[in-house]
């Protein structure tokens, strides 16, 4: 039987990245995986001239001035009540909010947490390691916890936990050339969500984004999830033509 990582590569050839999302099964649950390569224009978004963007529609309105639009997108990190990112956020090479390395409450503070970085390669880097040897990220978003760390699951994840949510996050290939963004279609616990990245997709590092406001914009799947205003958003940028 083909491993899902191999199946994903067959379903999503490198020439077809305009529609990168596919629905995949794992242990009785359903997940959407959106694979992005370095050749694509992947960006993080937070604010426009009037403040936090908050929605996929607002990002598309802003991109329209460039003659562009989102190819796919999802929420990309936790945020405060005013929608300011919790932890590091870098947009177009500029640090908007600072890195947080202290342990704290909630999922974000469940160390180790990590940073998703878009540089000359994609990376998910443990936050304290990032503080010591930060790459030159064009875009970056800190979130937590890291759910796969160098091929190992986060030690605090519980296999039979009854904490079930729609969850989303990102994993990165060992060579940094692929980032795979995942959202569950079913309510799953952290352990199953992490194992989807490691065991199904074969990704050595993965970072949790959220589990209460997780949303996806994937026109190829007819998805434009609505809900609470978001903080950080990640997505590919494509031509409107």
Image (cartoon, rainbow, N blue to C red):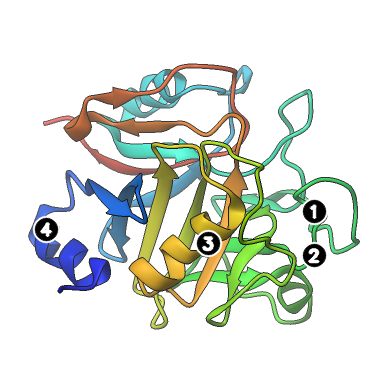
Mark 2–mark 1 distance (CA, rounded to whole Å):
17 Å
Viewer-side residue, 205 vs 232: 205
Query: Which numbered mark, 3 or 4, is in the foreground of this view?
Result: 3
Residue 238, x across and y down, in percent: 24, 41
Which mark is first along the chain, 2 or 4?
A: 4
Query: Which numbered mark, 2 or 1, is in the foreground of this view?
Result: 2
Which mark is first along the chain, 3 or 1?
A: 1
Mark 4–mark 2 distance (CA, rounded to whole Å):
35 Å
Residue 34, x across and y down, in percent: 31, 50
For mark 4, give the secondary structure: helix
Residue at image position (25%, 63%) is: 39
Mark 3–mark 2 distance (CA, rounded to whole Å):
15 Å
Disc marking residue 11: 4
For mark 1, give the secondary structure: loop
Quadrant in the rendering for residue 177: bottom left
Residue at image position (40%, 19%) is: 57
Give the labeled residue for mark 2: 111
Q: How crowded is mark 4: few (under 14 residues within 10 Å), some or many (20 or more)?
A: few
Mark 1–mark 3 distance (CA, rounded to whole Å):
26 Å
Give the labeled residue for mark 1: 98
Q: Do the residues labelled 1 and 3 touch (CB within 8 Å)?
A: no
Mark 1–mark 4 distance (CA, rounded to whole Å):
38 Å
Viewer-side residue, 2 vs 230: 2
Residue 118, x across and y down, in percent: 49, 62
Residue at image position (59%, 27%) is: 230
Which mark is first along the chain, 4 or 1?
A: 4
For mark 2, give the secondary structure: loop
- Relative to 192, residue 66 above or below: above
């Amino acid at each position: 039987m083909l491993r899902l990582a191999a199946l994903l590569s067959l379903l999503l050839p490198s020439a077809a990245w305009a529609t990168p999302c596919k629905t995949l099964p794992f242990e009785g649950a359903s997940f959407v995986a959106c694979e992005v390569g370095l050749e694509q224009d992947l960006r993080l978004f937070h604010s426009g001239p009037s403040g936090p963007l908050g929605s996929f529609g607002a990002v598309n309105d802003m991109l329209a001035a460039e003659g562009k639009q989102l190819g796919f997108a999802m929420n990309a990190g936790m945020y405060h009540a005013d929608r300011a990112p919790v932890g590091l956020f870098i947009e177009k090479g500029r640090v908007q909010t600072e890195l947080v390395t202290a342990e704290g409450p909630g999922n974000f503070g469940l160390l180790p947490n990590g940073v998703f970085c878009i540089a000359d390669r994609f990376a998910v880097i443990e936050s304290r390691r990032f503080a010591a040897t930060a790459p030159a990220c064009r875009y970056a978003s800190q979130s937590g916890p890291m759910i796969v760390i160098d091929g190992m699951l986060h030690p605090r994840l519980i296999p039979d936990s009854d904490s079930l949510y729609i969850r989303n996050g990102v994993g990165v290939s060992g060579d940094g050339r692929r980032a795979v963004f995942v959202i569950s279609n079913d309510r799953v616990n952290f352990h199953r969500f992490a194992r989807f990245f490691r065991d199904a997709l074969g990704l050595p590092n993965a970072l949790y984004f959220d589990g209460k406001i997780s949303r996806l914009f994937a026109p190829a799947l007819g998805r434009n999830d609505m809900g609470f205003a978001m903080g950080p958003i990640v997505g590919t940028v494509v031509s409107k033509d």
